[in-house]
Amino acid sequence: MNPKKRTGLNEKIIGRECYITTMDGSSLTVLNPTALLIWSLCDGEHSMSEIQAILAELYPDQAADRLQTDMERSLDDFRARGLLEHIT
């Protein structure tokens, strides 16, 4: 399953952070630059391994296992907050 953003969300970038709200404004999520990068790749086209490869390319000084952990935590957080499509 390739992670994909749920429809019906508003995104606003201010400075180096992204603010995501539901259409009714009932939920707010703030993403730091790394989480924003991961979020931007949640387009349904990039697999988790592709996202990890992009992170490794952009952060060559970071250990691969740390990048994988960061990616997995971000995706888990996006899922827990209901920001990703549910694919069965």
Image (cartoon, rainbow, N blue to C red):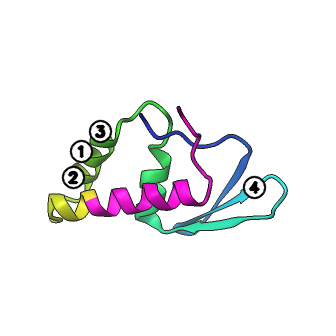
Q: Give amino acid for label 4.
A: Thr
- The residue wearing badge 1 is 53
From this view, report whether residue 53 is shown above or below residue 19.
above
- The residue wearing badge 3 is 50
Provide the secondary structure element on which disc 4 rests.
Answer: strand
Between disc 4 and disc 1, whose residue precedes?
4
Quadrant containing the N terminus in the rendered view:
top left
Between disc 4 and disc 3, whose residue precedes?
4
Provide the secondary structure element on which disc 3 rests.
Answer: helix
Bounds of the magenta segment: 69-88
Is mark 2 in CB contact (under 8 Å) with mark 1? yes
- The residue wearing badge 2 is 56
Q: Main secondary structure of the magenta part?
A: helix
Looking at the image, which residue sits at the far front?
88
**Residue 22 tag number:** 4
Q: Quadrant of residue 12?
A: bottom right
Disc 1: CA contacts within 10 A as few (<14), some (14-19) or many (>=20) = some
Q: CA distance from mark 4 to mark 1?
A: 30 Å
Q: Give amino acid for label 3.
A: Glu
Q: Is residue 88 left or right of residue 56?
A: right
* 60 in the magenta segment: no
Q: CA distance from mark 2 to mark 3?
A: 10 Å
Looking at the image, which residue sits at the far right?
24
Q: CA distance from mark 1 to mark 3?
A: 5 Å
Provide the secondary structure element on which disc 1 rests.
Answer: helix
Between disc 2 and disc 4, whose residue precedes?
4
Residue at 23 percent of width and 59 percent of height = 59
Q: Give amino acid for label 1.
A: Ala
Between disc 2 and disc 3, whose residue precedes?
3
Depth order, front residue of 40/77: 77
Is mark 1 in CB contact (under 8 Å) with mark 3? yes
